[in-house]
Amino acid sequence: MAEISVLGEFEQIALLAVLRLDDKAYGVTIRSEITVCTGREPAPGALYTTLDRLEEKGLLTSRFGDPTPQRGGRAKRYFAVSAAGIAAIAQSQRGYRRLLEGVELPGVTHA
Amino acid sequence: MRKAHIAERILSLFTSRDRAASMAGDLIENARGRSPMRFWADVCRTALSLLWRDFSADPSFLAGLAFRGLLVNLSLFIVMLIGIIVCSGLFGLIVRSPPLWVFRLWGAIAMCAAQFQTGQWLGRRARGKEMLACVAFLIVKRSSC
């Protein structure tokens, strides 16, 4: 069985944002999705280095789209989560859920 | 779009050309309705993040490259110095008591040529990480002085 990568918190956030955006996931949309969902705006450098690292780990794939005039003829780099990426997210989320089982957070109702 | 071109050139010192172009495009898209200062701050932060990522990925390779670069730089400087001495000797045969600025000019040219050649040597050995190799070389050179 292939070894599943251990993910850091921001890596999970980035992978989940790419999953949510489906085929529209590129730098700008990923960053805004993270801002909308988590309330914190990631630094662009931190996001790009994380996306590159996830691609090196084989958890993400990327392809360049067609150049657009709005961006001065610069192509967008679209990301997609690979099967290994989905397995890694699933494992990480299982860990969080197990940790939360039976835990009562005062003043918070479980979703 | 001039600033996008400059940003792309800056970022391409730290990553591949196509990735730098897409990053510059993203930063331009993000910068709409924001101040130019914010755009340049994002470009600098992105460049620094890329620099740090490459440095932390393989520090031993960079340290080795910087030390080898220092040796190459010293060797080139010695070769240039020998060249200057030989040229000065030949020049002294033609012109009696040449002015001091001639030697200073040759010295400056030799120094620039040695630095330029060292930069090229480093660039060939760290494709896509040229800026990082030069920064590592400068740190080693400054700390060895």
Image (spheres, coloured by chain):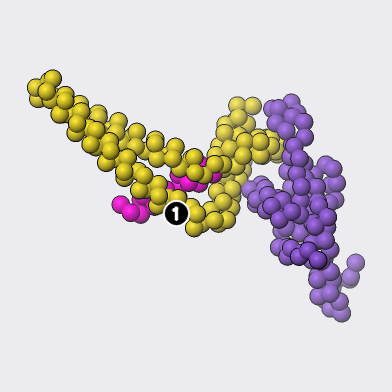
Q: Which chain is the one coloured purple?
A: A
* Residue B22 position (above or below residue A89): above
Q: Which residues are magenta?
A: B129-145
Name the residue nearer the viewer: B109 or A50.
B109
Q: Residue at x 34, y 37 (%)?
A: B114
Q: Position of residue B73 (x, y in %)?
A: 35, 43
Q: Is residue B39 left or right of residue B114?
A: right
| Amino acid found under the numbered disc labelled 1 | Gly
Picture coordinates of residue B75, whole percent (x, y)? 31, 43
Which quadrant of the figure contains the N terminus of chain B? top right
Q: Nearer the viewer, residue A30 or B20?
A: B20
Disc 1 target residue:
B64
In the image, what residue occupies the spot 27% across and 36% down?
B80
- Decide: few, some or many residues near mark 1? Use Cα within 10 Å; few <14, some 14-19, many ≥20: few
Is residue A97 visible in the rendered image? The answer is yes
Specify the colour of chain B.
Answer: yellow
